[in-house]
Amino acid sequence: MDSKKLTKDKFGGFIDLLSKQKLYVPQMAGETLRFAPVDSKDEVNLVFSNTAVPPKSVLFPQTETLYEYEAGGTEMIIPEGPEEKVLLGVRPCDARALTIVDKLFSWDIDDPYYLKKREATTIIGLACQEPGINCFCTSVGGGPASTEGLDLLLTDLGEGYLLQPLTEKGEKLCQDAGELLVDAAGEDNQAADKVHQEAAEKIVRNINVDGIPQKLEDLWESPLWKKVSDACLGCGACTFLCPTCHCFDIQDEMEGFEGRRCRVWDSCMFKEYTLHTSGHNPRPTRRERTRNRVNHKYSYFVKNFGTIACVGCGRCINNCPVNIDILDILSQVVKEAL
Amino acid sequence: MVDLEKLKNVAKDTVSREDVKYLIGWRQGTYGFRVSPLFMTEPEDADKLIFSPLCVNNLATYLTLAEKLPVPRGAEPDTRKVALMVKGCDSRAVVQQLIEKGIERESVLVIGCPCQGVLDLEKVEEKFPGIHSPVDVQWGDDKFIINLPDGPQEVPREELLAKKCLNCRYPNPVMSDVMLWEEVEAWGNGEYADVKELEEKDSQARWSFWQDKFESCIRCYACRNACPMCYCEDCVLDRLNPQWIYRSNNISENTVFHLARAFHLVGRCIECGECERVCPMGLPLMTLNRKLVKEVRDKYDFEPGLDPESKPFQSSYRPDDQEDFIL
Amino acid sequence: MSEQYDPNIVAFLCNWCSYAGADLAGTSRTHYPANINIIRVMCSGRVNPLFIINALQQGADGVLVSGCHPGDCHYMEGNFYARRRFGLMKELLEYVGVDPKRFNMSWVSASEGSKWKDVVEDVVEKAKEAGPFEQFRRNKINW
């Protein structure tokens, strides 16, 4: 299907159409932006750099009930299947991250909770125009207008949006929109290409990832890891806000005689993440934990799935309280391995 | 005034000492206005040390953060000192840890850096966005001199001062083994505008304020980990039996987490503001802590982290403590 | 608030004074509201602030901590520590917007059966005024 154009005066109508399903857009929660369901059209504002919490929080919520039970009972009450959702305004990096998380959750065992939600969700991307200071998506195979993981990509052309349908879901949405859209002219496509290119040029930080998985393997015992992890506080800011981090912990929670088994986000930077019942901890210090975080993204995941589990959104760099910078670590790795 | 040469020389001499394991100071970060802690073991690293309005991190946290691994059989435990650079607020954290016997006096060597107030990272990054190269910032008279890539800029002090510094009463280290330069004059009067503002609201408004904040918490525990006073080996938040606080993220558990965290700091919080600074969700955690600091000071006439010989607030009492709340 | 509303109140009583006081009220056949759920602890100084928060979380509408009068503590000074701790706990709860009527503390000695009755009546009255506690109650709505 060819690309379409949505002028801004028709934008309200487009939102109405999307609102037929549950619509999520970036909204302020407390002091920061995150994806939340929309109650009224006024809340839709697509001018932002990127959300503080990545959209993975919708498909892989921080707390997710797996089933409920009663004390002493044997019956599992599994929550009803997910409702149809639309995520509007997902940045291409975060959408790419979903394709990475997909690989994990459909690996040896299909994770029904995640995959059903993923199936029921339409993801509408918004090409990035103002990359953040620590963005490096272009170094890890993405870009400000990357289409991976998206059903439909919007590009803000000023007077309107250019819509590029990418999957059947996206095409169906364009068909449903019908009258609201017009066929995009050749110059619109060119304008969009220009916007995409200008955004890519604004990205300053970069890293050459060639050979990094092997280098990481070679540097397993390097003193480098102690050096880069000394300052680490061991908090979960980097991992909880990472769009590709997917670790969880299973918890049983009781309220009176009713209980639920739920999964909650967990972080490999926490000391009890690998703590055994015996008291032994195979990753006893922050050195091993930091090493694991970098290796998982740039080495293990590459070996298992053939892709780097980092999309270059820069959140871990922005949010680290002590300026532990993954690009800095990687450049030290490259230097050290020579 | 800041004397960087002296700081570097003292640092070199310190790490050359036999009885010092390493020195913790500040170094320029990888971009913009960021600063990172430097763990210095070699005298050559002294050139990386800085002390500027960007040095906001409270390094006292690292005294208790280092993991204590079991000593291999036959080996002697490493009893060398850790040298630590402290600002006024940081030194109170060290003192409070000494009061609580969290660390031993012999295990730490305190290098005092009187401080004129640090920058609010959020404000400065908003004012000068998109700067990739590391920026050097200096104190001027009532202003900050910011050496941007395209030339220096002067900004009035009040505009960019961190919230915790606006009302600082202890800019000079209250305890040190070496004081690097002259002490500065304190400027704070100990009034908390944010607490007062919230206290004047009604109960419902206060709850909606905190509900909104607590709901957006992601429980990354950065506030706990960055806090120099949160050093329990086995934190109540991690404990599974009894599990006072569930791991699930909802308003109930998040509120309890924040109340528990704040309450564990009663009579211990030394107002370094690290919890609030490190919060990726921008929660005003100091507004919670300051309330208790204020009550402890006004009603119990107690301030933590000043005298290493004093007793901790919660394990001492006075027979005439207030009891007007008792039925 | 409807007449029927019966608040749930959790009371932490010290073994040596307040629990004996409540016992005395019972053996003297004193009538007082039955909304109180007593948990006996060895000393008011043993009550962890998390007990209070957790009680509210699990369905209490009010919490009472009661111990010996200052100076009468079986362990000499346990209630002095409790007084410091819970004075601030009350401030903190009030500050985040929890109705201060929900949390109370009292001194009731072993001989004060009638004072126990007055305290309970007062606490129940206050909890009724405050209404059901919902703010950070741990319930299925949060699931």
Image (cartoon, coloured by chain):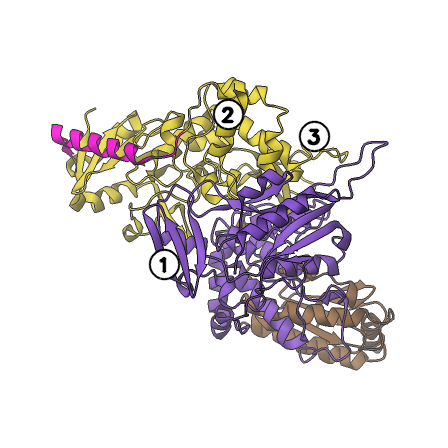
Chain colours: A yellow, B purple, C brown
Instruction: Work out whether residue A244 or residue C42 is closer to the camera in this orientation and state it.
Output: A244
The residue carrying pointer 1 sits among few (fewer than 14), some (14 to 19) or many (20 or more) residues within 10 Å by Cα, namely some
Q: Which residues are magenta?
A: A182-206
| Residue at point 76%, 77% (across, down) | C116
Q: Are marks 1 and 3 in contact (CB under 8 Å)?
A: no
The residue carrying pointer 3 sits among few (fewer than 14), some (14 to 19) or many (20 or more) residues within 10 Å by Cα, namely few
* Residue designated by label 2: A335
* Residue designated by label 1: B154
Instruction: Work out whether residue B280 or residue A171 is closer to the camera in this orientation and state it.
Output: B280
Task: Look at label 1 and name its amino acid.
Answer: Glu
- Indicate left or right for C114 with B26 as reference: right
**Residue A224 visible in rendering:** yes
The residue carrying pointer 2 sits among few (fewer than 14), some (14 to 19) or many (20 or more) residues within 10 Å by Cα, namely few
**Magenta: main secondary structure:** helix
Q: Position of residue C50 (x, y in %)?
A: 68, 58
| Residue B264 placement: quadrant | bottom right
Q: Give the alpha-carbon distance from disc 1 to disc 2, as whole Å.
A: 37 Å
Q: Is residue C31 above or below residue A14?
A: below
Badge 3 sits on which subunit? A
The disc at residue A282 is 3
Instruction: Work out whether residue B309 or residue A144 is closer to the camera in this orientation and state it.
Output: B309
Task: Look at label 3 and name its amino acid.
Answer: Pro
Q: Position of residue C55 (x, y in %)?
A: 66, 60
Q: Give the alpha-carbon distance from disc 3 to disc 2, as whole Å.
A: 28 Å
